[in-house]
Amino acid sequence: SQQGEEDPQALSIQEGENATMNCSYKTSINNLQWYRQNSGRGLVHLILIRSNEREKHSGRLRVTLDTSKKSSSLLITASRAADTASYFCATAAFSNSGGYQKVTFGTGTKLQVIP
Amino acid sequence: NAGVTQTPKFRVLKTGQSMTLLCAQDMNHEYMYWYRQDPGMGLRLIHYSVGEGTTAKGEVPDGYNVSRLKKQNFLLGLESAAPSQTSVYFCASKDTLSSYEQYFGPGTRLTVT
Protein backbone atom coordinates (compact mmCIF):
# COMPACT_ATOMS: atom_id res chain seq x y z
CA SER A 1 0.00 0.00 0.00
CA GLN A 2 1.07 3.59 -0.48
CA GLN A 3 2.85 5.91 1.94
CA GLY A 4 -0.12 8.24 2.12
CA GLU A 5 -3.61 6.84 2.11
CA GLU A 6 -6.62 9.04 2.50
CA ASP A 7 -9.84 8.05 4.10
CA PRO A 8 -12.59 8.18 3.02
CA GLN A 9 -12.06 7.80 -0.72
CA ALA A 10 -15.18 9.85 -1.35
CA LEU A 11 -17.30 12.16 0.79
CA SER A 12 -20.55 13.92 0.03
CA ILE A 13 -21.91 16.61 2.36
CA GLN A 14 -24.35 19.51 2.35
CA GLU A 15 -23.14 23.06 2.09
CA GLY A 16 -22.46 24.49 5.53
CA GLU A 17 -21.45 21.16 7.04
CA ASN A 18 -17.91 20.32 8.10
CA ALA A 19 -15.80 17.90 6.08
CA THR A 20 -13.12 15.74 7.66
CA MET A 21 -10.66 13.63 5.74
CA ASN A 22 -7.82 11.55 7.09
CA CYS A 23 -4.39 10.55 5.90
CA SER A 24 -2.27 7.69 7.20
CA TYR A 25 1.36 7.10 6.38
CA LYS A 26 4.00 4.51 7.16
CA THR A 27 7.45 6.05 7.62
CA SER A 28 8.88 8.98 9.57
CA ILE A 29 8.33 12.36 7.98
CA ASN A 30 9.64 15.93 8.14
CA ASN A 31 6.35 17.50 7.23
CA LEU A 32 2.94 16.75 5.78
CA GLN A 33 1.12 18.89 3.27
CA TRP A 34 -2.40 18.98 1.95
CA TYR A 35 -3.21 19.84 -1.65
CA ARG A 36 -6.50 20.44 -3.47
CA GLN A 37 -7.22 19.43 -7.04
CA ASN A 38 -10.21 20.77 -8.89
CA SER A 39 -11.52 18.60 -11.70
CA GLY A 40 -9.23 18.73 -14.73
CA ARG A 41 -6.70 20.99 -13.04
CA GLY A 42 -3.33 20.73 -11.34
CA LEU A 43 -2.84 20.47 -7.58
CA VAL A 44 -2.82 23.56 -5.40
CA HIS A 45 -0.99 23.70 -2.08
CA LEU A 46 -3.28 24.34 0.90
CA ILE A 47 -1.34 23.96 4.13
CA LEU A 48 1.79 22.43 5.62
CA ILE A 49 2.31 21.00 9.08
CA ARG A 50 5.76 20.15 10.39
CA SER A 51 6.52 16.97 12.29
CA ASN A 52 6.95 18.91 15.56
CA GLU A 53 3.54 20.58 15.24
CA ARG A 54 0.26 19.07 16.32
CA GLU A 55 -2.29 21.47 14.86
CA LYS A 56 -2.37 24.22 12.28
CA HIS A 57 -5.10 26.58 11.08
CA SER A 58 -5.55 28.50 7.87
CA GLY A 59 -8.89 30.21 7.33
CA ARG A 60 -11.54 27.46 7.31
CA LEU A 61 -8.90 24.74 7.28
CA ARG A 62 -7.66 22.91 10.33
CA VAL A 63 -4.96 20.27 10.10
CA THR A 64 -3.85 17.95 12.86
CA LEU A 65 -0.86 15.64 12.94
CA ASP A 66 -0.31 12.67 15.23
CA THR A 67 3.17 11.32 14.57
CA SER A 68 2.71 8.48 17.09
CA LYS A 69 -0.21 7.18 15.03
CA LYS A 70 1.32 8.32 11.73
CA SER A 71 -1.87 10.08 10.77
CA SER A 72 -3.19 13.50 9.87
CA SER A 73 -6.62 14.97 9.40
CA LEU A 74 -7.90 17.89 7.36
CA LEU A 75 -11.05 19.62 8.55
CA ILE A 76 -12.88 22.08 6.32
CA THR A 77 -15.43 24.03 8.32
CA ALA A 78 -18.63 25.56 6.95
CA SER A 79 -18.09 23.94 3.56
CA ARG A 80 -19.07 25.67 0.32
CA ALA A 81 -19.92 24.31 -3.11
CA ALA A 82 -16.59 25.74 -4.29
CA ASP A 83 -14.80 23.32 -1.93
CA THR A 84 -15.84 20.46 -4.21
CA ALA A 85 -12.53 18.92 -5.27
CA SER A 86 -10.13 16.08 -4.53
CA TYR A 87 -7.84 16.51 -1.56
CA PHE A 88 -4.42 14.87 -1.31
CA CYS A 89 -1.99 14.55 1.53
CA ALA A 90 1.71 14.58 0.72
CA THR A 91 4.37 13.41 3.13
CA ALA A 92 7.92 14.70 2.91
CA ALA A 93 11.06 13.09 4.25
CA PHE A 94 14.72 13.46 3.46
CA SER A 95 16.02 10.63 1.34
CA ASN A 96 18.53 8.10 2.71
CA SER A 97 21.26 9.60 0.54
CA GLY A 98 20.52 13.01 2.00
CA GLY A 99 20.01 16.33 0.30
CA TYR A 100 16.74 15.46 -1.36
CA GLN A 101 13.34 15.78 0.18
CA LYS A 102 11.19 12.91 -1.05
CA VAL A 103 7.53 13.83 -1.33
CA THR A 104 4.93 11.08 -1.61
CA PHE A 105 1.32 11.82 -2.50
CA GLY A 106 -1.62 9.86 -1.25
CA THR A 107 -4.51 8.53 -3.29
CA GLY A 108 -6.88 11.38 -2.44
CA THR A 109 -10.35 12.01 -1.03
CA LYS A 110 -12.99 13.18 -3.46
CA LEU A 111 -15.20 15.75 -1.73
CA GLN A 112 -18.57 16.81 -3.07
CA VAL A 113 -20.35 19.71 -1.41
CA ILE A 114 -24.01 19.86 -2.37
CA PRO A 115 -25.52 23.36 -2.53
CA ASN B 1 3.64 35.55 -14.38
CA ALA B 2 2.18 32.36 -15.88
CA GLY B 3 3.54 29.98 -13.22
CA VAL B 4 3.90 26.45 -14.59
CA THR B 5 2.67 25.72 -18.08
CA GLN B 6 2.48 22.42 -19.95
CA THR B 7 2.32 21.68 -23.64
CA PRO B 8 0.28 20.02 -25.10
CA LYS B 9 -2.93 19.76 -23.07
CA PHE B 10 -4.16 16.62 -24.83
CA ARG B 11 -2.55 14.05 -27.10
CA VAL B 12 -3.47 10.71 -28.60
CA LEU B 13 -0.62 8.44 -29.66
CA LYS B 14 -0.47 5.07 -31.33
CA THR B 15 1.60 2.33 -29.68
CA GLY B 16 5.24 2.74 -30.61
CA GLN B 17 5.06 6.44 -31.43
CA SER B 18 7.22 8.95 -29.62
CA MET B 19 6.49 12.36 -28.20
CA THR B 20 7.86 15.03 -25.89
CA LEU B 21 5.93 16.87 -23.21
CA LEU B 22 7.17 20.34 -22.40
CA CYS B 23 7.00 21.97 -18.99
CA ALA B 24 7.97 25.59 -18.49
CA GLN B 25 8.12 27.68 -15.31
CA ASP B 26 8.79 31.39 -14.97
CA MET B 27 9.42 31.48 -11.21
CA ASN B 28 13.17 30.74 -11.40
CA HIS B 29 12.62 27.54 -9.39
CA GLU B 30 15.48 25.10 -8.97
CA TYR B 31 13.48 21.90 -8.63
CA MET B 32 11.18 20.45 -11.26
CA TYR B 33 9.18 17.24 -11.30
CA TRP B 34 7.18 15.03 -13.62
CA TYR B 35 4.32 13.01 -12.16
CA ARG B 36 1.70 10.75 -13.62
CA GLN B 37 -1.76 10.46 -12.15
CA ASP B 38 -3.85 7.34 -12.60
CA PRO B 39 -7.23 6.53 -11.03
CA GLY B 40 -6.85 5.20 -7.49
CA MET B 41 -3.05 5.60 -7.57
CA GLY B 42 -2.52 9.19 -6.55
CA LEU B 43 0.47 10.96 -8.08
CA ARG B 44 3.60 8.96 -8.82
CA LEU B 45 6.94 10.61 -9.45
CA ILE B 46 8.52 9.76 -12.81
CA HIS B 47 11.67 11.89 -12.88
CA TYR B 48 12.85 15.03 -11.20
CA SER B 49 15.57 17.66 -11.48
CA VAL B 50 17.35 19.59 -8.74
CA GLY B 51 18.79 22.17 -11.10
CA GLU B 52 19.73 23.00 -14.66
CA GLY B 53 21.58 20.14 -16.31
CA THR B 54 20.57 17.57 -13.68
CA THR B 55 17.99 14.79 -13.75
CA ALA B 56 17.20 11.84 -11.50
CA LYS B 57 14.84 8.88 -11.48
CA GLY B 58 11.70 8.85 -9.42
CA GLU B 59 9.35 6.06 -8.51
CA VAL B 60 8.24 4.99 -12.02
CA PRO B 61 10.94 6.06 -14.52
CA ASP B 62 10.82 3.14 -16.97
CA GLY B 63 9.80 4.09 -20.50
CA TYR B 64 10.48 7.80 -19.95
CA ASN B 65 13.45 10.10 -20.41
CA VAL B 66 13.89 13.71 -19.33
CA SER B 67 16.14 16.66 -19.97
CA ARG B 68 16.71 19.99 -18.21
CA LEU B 69 18.92 21.95 -20.58
CA LYS B 70 17.49 25.27 -19.43
CA LYS B 71 16.49 26.10 -15.87
CA GLN B 72 12.99 27.08 -16.86
CA ASN B 73 12.20 24.01 -18.97
CA PHE B 74 11.82 20.33 -18.12
CA LEU B 75 11.06 17.94 -20.96
CA LEU B 76 9.54 14.49 -20.63
CA GLY B 77 10.04 12.10 -23.52
CA LEU B 78 8.32 8.87 -24.43
CA GLU B 79 10.47 7.06 -27.00
CA SER B 80 8.06 4.22 -27.77
CA ALA B 81 4.65 4.78 -26.25
CA ALA B 82 2.72 1.90 -24.71
CA PRO B 83 -0.95 1.70 -23.65
CA SER B 84 0.25 1.48 -20.01
CA GLN B 85 1.46 5.06 -20.39
CA THR B 86 -2.06 6.34 -20.85
CA SER B 87 -2.36 8.79 -17.99
CA VAL B 88 -2.55 12.40 -16.97
CA TYR B 89 0.92 13.93 -16.64
CA PHE B 90 1.65 16.79 -14.29
CA CYS B 91 4.72 18.93 -14.07
CA ALA B 92 5.57 20.76 -10.86
CA SER B 93 8.29 23.07 -9.62
CA LYS B 94 9.69 24.08 -6.25
CA ASP B 95 11.96 26.93 -5.27
CA THR B 96 14.78 25.41 -3.22
CA LEU B 97 15.65 22.36 -1.13
CA SER B 98 14.29 23.99 2.02
CA SER B 99 11.03 25.17 0.48
CA TYR B 100 8.05 22.86 0.56
CA GLU B 101 5.29 24.06 -1.72
CA GLN B 102 5.18 22.55 -5.17
CA TYR B 103 3.51 24.53 -7.95
CA PHE B 104 1.71 22.38 -10.47
CA GLY B 105 0.92 22.82 -14.12
CA PRO B 106 -2.55 22.13 -15.54
CA GLY B 107 -1.67 18.64 -16.79
CA THR B 108 -1.43 16.79 -20.09
CA ARG B 109 -3.93 14.06 -20.82
CA LEU B 110 -2.22 11.36 -22.92
CA THR B 111 -3.98 8.41 -24.48
CA VAL B 112 -1.99 5.61 -26.12
CA THR B 113 -4.03 3.32 -28.34
Image (cartoon, coloured by chain):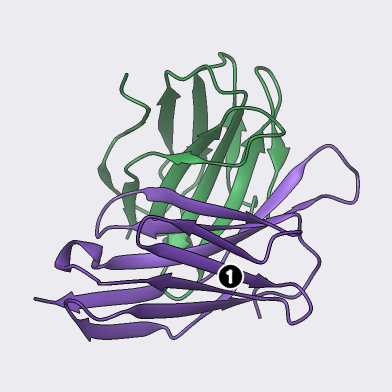
Chain colours: A purple, B green
Image location (x, y in percent) of residue B4: 39, 30
Q: Which residue is mark 1?
A: A64
Foreground residue, A46 or B21?
A46
Foreground residue, A6 or B67?
A6
Give me the residue at 59% from left, 15% from top.
B69
Q: Is residue A75 above or below residue A10?
A: above
Q: Is residue A31 above or below residue A24?
A: above
Most distant residue in the left direction: A115
Figure disc tally: 1
Locate the N terminus of chain A and report the quarter of the image it occupies.
bottom right
* A16 on left or right of A10: left
* B28 on left or right of B100: left
* B5 on left or right of A56: left
Quarter assignment of residue A4: bottom right
Categorize mark 1 by other alpha carbons within 10 Å: few (<14), some (14-19), many (20+): some
Image location (x, y in percent) of residue B12: 27, 49
Q: Chain of mark 1?
A: A
Give me the residue at 35% from left, 83% from top.
A10
- Asked if residue A70 shows in the view, the reply is yes
* B10 on left or right of A90: left
Image location (x, y in percent) of residue B9: 26, 41
Looking at the picture, which amino acid does disc 1 mark?
Thr
